[in-house]
Image (cartoon, rainbow, N blue to C red):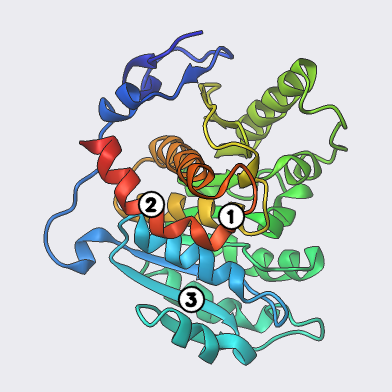
Amino acid sequence: MSSEGGKGGKGGTATREPHIITTTLLRDWALPDAEGDKNSSGTVIVVGGNRGMPGAVLLAGQAAMRAGAGKLQLITVESVAAALGVSIPEAYVVGVAADGHGDLDGSAAEQIIEMAAEADAVVIGPGIMSPEASNRLLGEVIPHLDCALSLDALGLAYLTDNLDGVKHLAGRTVLSPNATELFKTLGETAPTNLNSAQGRDTLVDATLRLASTTGAVVVSGAEVSFIASPDGELWVDEGGGQGLAVSGSGDVKSGVIAGLLARGAAPEQAAVWAAAVHGRCGERLASAFGPRGFMASDLPPEIPAILAELQA
């Protein structure tokens, strides 16, 4: 295996052999370091939530700011917007209409598009609970976006019957499915043996195929993360551990991706760094709590120190 890949493999030859993400690789591929006021660090919008699951938006938003975004805006269902605003006072929170199942109603599309026009990165998906609601809303929103996009969780349902649905963003999209979501997006059933060597190869193959088909960078996995670019470049991060396989963990990862995109990182760079930071958060919390038992809400406070250490 290649262990470095030359600043993350930028401009290198496409390969199925992964670059192992190391501290050296990350330091040779330094993140943009914005100077000036909060506007220079970028604005992130998180779109999602449900009456019964408002916390996913909170986790993604906190992670985006902990990753260095300068401004945060949350768009969620009106019934939980006030509570979210109190929980994260740094954010501008907008409440919109909900459908009969508590998800964002399609009538919110115009406002989302209007706000996204002023944003540097948008996260869509955390906390949305219905594939049908996701398809209705995202079908009205995504074709009109012109900024970096982090698409997560049921936000990926939009691509299942529309795999070219983000190609107009010209390589500014990062998809972060878990294994089940990855195969569903491809219209396939996830195999049951993903922890075996054969299963790992299957997961890598699916990650590469989704990246090639959609024209987006794809981050898959949990205990081990695989990152694939549309041209076939592949990275792997083996940090983290089993404790990251917990509800809300993926929302944190998608928020870190968006925060780094807002700072000006390229999609491949944002995805590689986010996977590494997410994994090291898991390692640090495992040392404090044990291999299992920490929660996704424990992850965001660890992000700034880990970023600082990796960039030192």
* C-alpha gap between disc 3 and disc 1: 25 Å
Closest to the camera, between mark 3 and mark 1, is 1
**Image depth: mark 2 or mark 1 in front:** 1
Q: Secondary structure at mark 3?
A: strand
Contact? badges 2 and 1 (CB < 8 Å) = no
How dense is the environment of label 3, judged by Cα within 10 Å: few (below 14), some, or many (20 and up)?
Answer: many
**Left or right of 28 on screen, residue 250:** right
Does 305 appear above or below 239? below
Say if mark 3 contacts mark 1, CB within 8 Å. no
The residue under the point 61% across, 33% down is 211
Q: Quadrant of the C terminus?
A: top left
Q: What kind of element bears circle 1?
A: loop
Q: Is 232 drawn above or below residue 210 in the view shown?
A: above
Under mark 2, the amino acid is Ile
Instruction: Identify the residue at horizontal 15%, vertical 67% (top origin).
Output: 37
Decide if residue 178 is in sight here.
yes
Classed neighbour count for the residue bearing mark 1: other residues with Cα under 10 Å, few (<14), some (14–19), many (≥20): some
Counting from the top left corner in percent of width and height, residue 271 is at 46, 40
Numbered label attached to residue 294: 1
In the rendered structure, which amino acid carries the disc numbered 1?
Phe
Q: Is 250 located above or below residue 180 in the figure? A: below
In the foreground, 105 or 102:
102
Task: Measure the C-alpha gap from mark 2 to mark 3.
Answer: 20 Å
Mark 3, residue position: 74
